[in-house]
Image (spheres, rainbow, N blue to C red):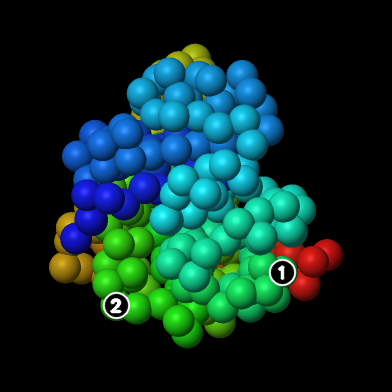
Amino acid sequence: MIKKNAIIGFIGAGNMANALIQGLTMSGLYQPEQILASDTDQNRLEAVSKHHGIKGYPGNNDLVRDSNILLIAVKPQVIQDVLEEIKDGIRDDHLMISIAAGIPTTLILSIIGRDIPVIRVMPNTPALIQKGVSALAPSKKVTSEQMDIARAIFTAVGETVAVNEDMMNAVTALSGSGPGFVFQIMECFVSAGERLGFDADTALRLVARTFLGSTALADTSNLSLAQLREMVTSPGGTTAAGLKYFDENGLATIIQGAVKAAYDRGVELGKGK
């Protein structure tokens, strides 16, 4: 349950912060006057503030002072600088939520030098249309009530799962980076359609609706993915021919390798590399 005096401050007003702010205000979970934002890009900050009717801050420290929930929505490469800047203003009653990929709660706490509740979250870009999935991992000091607050925030843009923090790099690789992998695969399908004679718009429509329908079927069906695949695959038919090509050319190895590469990069980011 969100308290009426809860003030959430977004440090960073990029795409994901914008999606979260939209979800929070559209759901009625937070009123615009309960949401603050800061960003180094003043044009972006002004646009977000005007669009959502929230208060924008040119600097982070004033936002920290006026918030009791801090949502860190900056790139992992700059999070250390941001935390160093605001650490003196952080209070014991602050709840910090970080969506910086690859940055463990232990690193955050070591930088700020204060043992406050920190929840690490990995959302993904379908949150932009309230269809995301976010994984939440709490530090030791986080209470069940604070986890409920974080779940409510991210449920406003999709679904949530709670995981142990040692699984967060895997989450980042699978669902965080996953949309980028899916979009490239879709690009390849569209290109294949164009090679067969479709114009780009028609190919995109066919591919997008195929992925959308297939995903909805997988999400709602009681059948496994293998069973759903077999439903489309007649022996000696067209789908079988395409799947055979996938197998012969190592599709599974390529996808597993891409996810592992994303995972490894997340580990590196957590080490400050």
The part of the image, by quadrant, that contains residue 128 is: top left
Query: Quick check: 48 left or right of 109?
Result: left
Image quarter of residue 195: top right
Label 1 is placed on what type of residue? Answer: Ile
Say few, some or many: other residues with alpha carbon within 10 Å of mark 1 (under 14 / 14 to 19 / 20 or more). some
Quadrant that contains the N terminus: bottom left
Q: Can you give x and y, in whole percent of width and height, for residue 83 in the image? A: 68, 58
Count how many numbered circles sit on residues in the image. 2
Q: Which residue is mark 1?
A: 111
At x 74%, y 58%, the residue is: 84
Dot label at residue 144: 2
Report whether 30 appears left or right of 239: left
Can residue 238 be seen? no
Callout 2 secondary element: helix
| Nearer-N-terminus badge (1/2) | 1
Residue 241 x, y percent position in the rendering = 47, 53
Q: Amino acid at mark 2?
A: Ser
Image height of 166 relative to 37, above or below: below
